[in-house]
Image: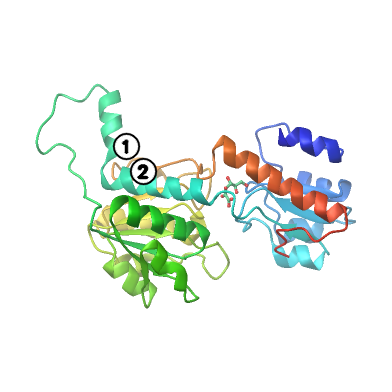
């Protein structure tokens, strides 16, 4: 639907392969098109953006809210406007964070694998015992749209106590049942589940590293639906192996789509293929939002979701 709407406004050249564009193809696109509609797999880093000369493109329209794959500084230097698609994928992404928390705490993936493998020999009172979530503490790192949506679900849906960490005071937090924690260390130490909802920037890279993981409780679970870079994956594997934490639910990875080989072998880890926003409704809303930014820009209006 969105492709048809795009084609009504622009001459569209589609990457019809499943493979992301490489640096060379991205440079060619920047040199040959007025705008680039890109996704998380298009690595528009400094080398690509500064290396592409001359530049025909004037705007990078990111299909997604996170834009850590775009070097915004380099884009700005080249006079490129950058936009994203905030707001439209909040609920779906929070749903997946909630699902990962439930799957990991209640060992649902393990249970499903057991049934499918024909290994279920019948009910026993101690089979696949997990952690009850009701009454437990969820620590939310980052309290933007998705973090708040996760808080609401956990508090009102599951009866969890919610604590959050944010750079800014959030007077509205109490409406979603959340109270602030003074520091990352304090949040990690008091939480039974920690869910990450901050954008990936050079400053937040490896926010959850070996030190941070050491503050978590041995029965605690880490959930990440934000970006893989936020977690030091090698340190996470070591913490899971050592029993520093009990499990992890992940939708994003440091070297996507490569998965740390040890993670794939761990029963207490739930692994999803970056599908936080993957619903028909949201993909369409993301496309419409991207289109709105393109149309506004080429009409000479301010794009609604300009980030640079
Ligand atoms: C997308 C996402 O699947 O919006 C984001 O930041 O990670 C996902 O919703 C992806 O970014 C598509 O480009």
Label 1: element kind? helix
Report, in whole angstroms, how far the alpha carbon at label 1 lies from the one at label 2: 7 Å
Label 2: element kind? strand
Q: Which mark is residue 136?
A: none
Place residue 199 in its image quadrant.
Answer: bottom right
Residue 45, above or below 257:
below
Q: Where does label 2 land, which residue? A: 270
| Residue 47, position as x, y percentages in the image | 74, 59
Quarter occupied by the N terminus: top right
At label 1, counting other C-alpha atoms closer than 10 Å, the crowd grade (few under 14, some 14-19, many 20 or more) is some
How was the colour assigned to the protein in this rendering?
rainbow
Q: In the orientation shown, which residue stands out farthest toward the top?
A: 118
Place residue 232 in its image quadrant.
Answer: bottom left
- Tell whether label 2 touches label 1 (CB within 8 Å): yes
Residue 120, above or below 252:
above
> Is residue 57 visible to us here?
no
Q: In the orientation shown, which residue stands out farthest toward the left?
A: 125
| Residue 180, position as x, y percentages in the image | 38, 73
Q: Foreground residue, 138 or 178?
A: 178
115 sits left or right of 8 in the view? left
Q: Which mark is residue 109?
A: 1
| Residue 296, position as x, y percentages in the image | 81, 54
């Amino acid at each position: 639907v969105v492709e048809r709407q795009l084609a009504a406004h622009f001459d569209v050249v589609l990457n019809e392969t499943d493979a992301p564009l490489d640096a060379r193809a991205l440079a060619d696109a920047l040199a040959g098109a007025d705008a680039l509609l890109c996704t998380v797999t298009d690595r528009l880093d400094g080398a690509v953006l500064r290396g592409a000369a001359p530049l025909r493109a004037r705007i990078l329209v990111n299909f997604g809210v996170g834009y850590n794959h775009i070097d915004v500084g380099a884009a700005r230097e080249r006079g490129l406007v950058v936009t994203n698609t905030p707001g439209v994928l909040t609920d779906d992404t929070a749903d997946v964070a909630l699902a990962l928390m439930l799957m990991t705490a209640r060992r649902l993936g393990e249970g499903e694998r057991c049934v499918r493998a024909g290994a279920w020999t019948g009910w026993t009172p101690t089979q696949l015992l997990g952690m009850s979530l009701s009454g437990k503490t969820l620590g939310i790192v980052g309290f933007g749209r998705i973090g708040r949506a996760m808080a609401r679900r956990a508090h009102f849906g599951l009866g969890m106590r919610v604590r959050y960490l944010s750079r800014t005071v959030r007077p509205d937090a109490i409406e979603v049942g959340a109270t602030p924690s003074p520091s990352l260390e304090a949040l990690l130490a008091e939480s039974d589940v920690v869910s990450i909802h901050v954008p990936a920037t050079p400053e937040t890279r490896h926010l959850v590293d070996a030190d941070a993981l050491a503050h978590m409780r041995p029965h605690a679970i880490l959930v990440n639906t934000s970006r893989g870079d936020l977690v030091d994956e090698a340190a996470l594997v070591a913490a899971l192996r050592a029993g520093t934490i009990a499990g992890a639910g992940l939708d994003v990875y440091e070297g996507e789509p490569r998965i740390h080989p040890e993670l794939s072998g761990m029963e207490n880890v739930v692994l999803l293929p970056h599908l936080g926003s993957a619903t028909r409704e949201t993909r369409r809303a993301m496309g419409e939002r991207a289109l709105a930014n393109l149309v506004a820009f080429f009409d000479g209006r301010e794009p609604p979701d300009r980030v640079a």
